[in-house]
Amino acid sequence: MWYQPIIVLLVAGVPYFFSLDGDFVFDDTEAILKNDDVTSNSWTDLFHHDFWGSRIDNAFSHKSYRPLTIISFKLNYLFNSERLSAPQFKITNCLLHITCCLLLWTVYKTLLLRLKLNNNYLNVEFLAALLFSSHPVHVEAVSGIVGRADILAAIAFFISFLMYDRAMNDCWMSIYYLSSSFLFAGIAMLFKENGVTVLGFCVIYELVVKIKTAKSTGKTAFIYTLDLLNRYTIIRWISTTITVFCFLYLRWIIMGRAKPEFKATDNPAAFSSDLFTNLATYNYIYFINILLLMWPKWLCYDWSMGCIPLIEDYSDYRIFFVVTLYVYAFLIIWYLLKSGRISNFLSFRLVILSQSLFVIPFLPASNLFYAVGFVIAERILYIPSAGYCLLVVIGLQKILLRLKSKNLRRIMISIFHFVILMYALRSMQRASEWQTEYKLFTSGLLVCPLNAKVHYNVAKVADAKNNVSWAMAEYQEAIRLYPDYYQAMNNYAILLKNHKQFSEAEFYLRKAISLKNDFPAAWMNLGIVLASMKNYAEAETAYNNSLKYRKQCPDCHYNLGNLYLELNKTESATASWFQAIQLNPKHKSAWTNLLAVLDNIGDMETALQTIPKALKELPDTPSVIFAIANIYGKLDQYEKAEEYFLKAIDLFKNKGKPIHYANLGVLYHRWRKYDLAEEMYEKALELQPSFKSARTNLNSLRKLKMKIK
């Protein structure tokens, strides 16, 4: 009916409408904001990099090769006047999700039409599409911008399937449709790795479609099926198999013939040496994935670390859920097989296809073939949930067929509609949590309180909101849950350092370094702490160690320059700041300190050569402008000095300090503009009545004015 696609569109889009004005959150930072492939002028580099912008052949790469998804990010950037706008990215994701839902509706119709199934009491494809459109487990894929990879892969997956279905008609166009199916399968794989599984589903699909009931022939279903196979079918299966192997081999070549390396915290079960722990934990994770589809209340952006503890003992109560899962699956299959009726046989085929659509796209994330770098990722369920949604509606149809009362059937259908409404509302609520990192990270505390990374992320957003006590408590909890969490130790030490608790900060930084010796940030922060404790020799060693592991670190060169300044090694200090500026031309503090020291040591020639470069990079940075004003003041270039002093004060706005007005007062004093000098001294003293030099200068100025009178 004409209104069905409109309803699907609304159900898919409305839950996300009120949260499109969000920020880049979580993985978006690494994949988009810090990924040069998105903003660079090059269109070829991204084909040599992984999803996060690292070289795909790098030993530390996660080997996630998704160049077409990166191109979509790049197009967003270019179409928005080369600006990274999170709302624009989110709107694109939402539109793609709507497109995918409408496309899936077509896929469902194709399946039912090919199997010649009647819609008794239900419009199966419509309700299944509504269930998929509203499902809260999709929020991560839609509201999390990096989830676009899953949506685009799903779109290409479904198009590939539709092309394969047309190729099954055995007409002269079959080769064209089959080639198109292979093309879109390859495109799906370049959006996200699991997209290539569409070809496996297509083979199962054709096999199930070919199976006929064999009662009237006296043959088994298998033999009867073989009789129905023709050379076109055989050619399709052989071609599909060869294509899959070619795609996988090409993927292996692109990865540099090496598997990705992950940490134990990413997927703890994969690093367990006990076979029972592996099998039990993996199967429990499968159960949790199904539970998220059935009851999407407990949604979390990160399921790593201790979120799901390992099952290490036979007495663990969670084994019951694993056994229940397989018993339930067995009972469903047994029930479908026990009856020889045609209607049940047709339903059985649709159930098999639904389960195949659920299981096959999930296989790359199942840890069956290789260990993956996550425990649970809700966006991974985007394609598999298409099979789940169809299976649920088939189950509902079976229930309705058994109910003889029309009222009971109406009640069941109403309950299903209510579930869709609840799913849509849950999606809306969950999408609002994906608007900001603060809401997203704090929501994780309710679902995964044992996940150290969740507490670590909450600590970061708490610190960003200047809630230091909360941040420190969360860092402590993260370290308690995972005693080897060196990143948390580093960040916790920074907070301790900021509160002058240098000994405690040193303890955590040294512990972090003992866990990861090549941790440049920890070495640099240790240098800052040691310098604050006047332990300059060890501080210099710490800075040099930091630079040994990360040579291109402007902040470390800047801090090393500050250390040299403390040691009165001004030449070494300026050299370090020049190095910091070379690595980061926008480094405000390095420019400010460099200009101030050149002023103090009287190296006006270098200062005058440096000023134009500083103004080119930071024309509106008040600290830099103020340093330039001081230099021109010393050179008796009063008009230029006044211009920059006034500009600096204007840029500082409410953050202006007494020294800014006092120095301008000194300029006017020397310039013999005594009234203006007096006004500036008074402003400085208004901000800081105990400012001795300003008070002394003001008194001498007033005495001078009295003499003149």
Image (cartoon, rainbow, N blue to C red):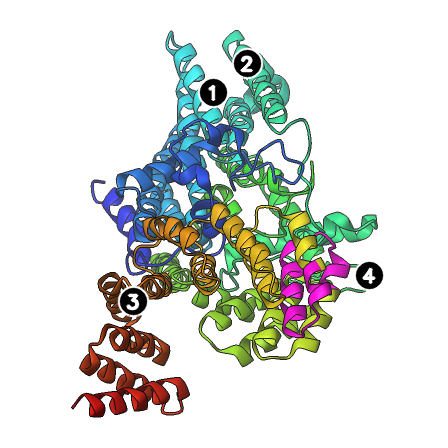
Instruction: Identify the residue under disc 2.
Output: 239
Which residue is outermost to the left?
Answer: 709
Q: Which numbered circle lies on residue 182?
A: 1
The disc labelled 3 sits on which kind of residue?
Answer: Ala
Question: In the picture, which quadrant includes the C terminus?
Answer: bottom left
Between disc 3 and disc 4, the foreground one is 3
User: x, y percentage for residue 452?
Assistant: 64, 65
How far apart marks 1 and 2 lie (CA) works out to 9 Å
Say which label, 1 or 3, has the lower sequence index.
Answer: 1
Q: Is residue 539 magenta?
A: yes
- Asked if labels 3 and 1 touch by Cβ distance under 8 angstroms, the answer is no
Instruction: Identify the residue under disc 3.
Output: 648
Q: Secondary structure at mark 2?
A: helix
The disc labelled 4 sits on which kind of residue?
Answer: Asp
- Asked if labels 4 and 3 touch by Cβ distance under 8 angstroms, the answer is no
Q: Which residue occupies 32% across, 57% down? A: 15
In depth, the one of 586 and 255 nearer the eye is: 586
Q: Secondary structure at mark 3?
A: helix
Between disc 1 and disc 3, the foreground one is 3
Instruction: Identify the residue under disc 4.
Output: 313
How far apart marks 4 and 2 lie (CA) works out to 46 Å
Q: Residues in magenta?
A: 511-540
User: x, y percentage for residue 130?
Assistant: 35, 49
Question: In the picture, which quadrant includes the N terminus?
Answer: top left
Q: Toward which corner of the image does residue 430 lie, by quadrant?
A: bottom left
Say which label, 1 or 2, has the lower sequence index.
Answer: 1
Q: Which residue occupies 36% across, 92% down? A: 689
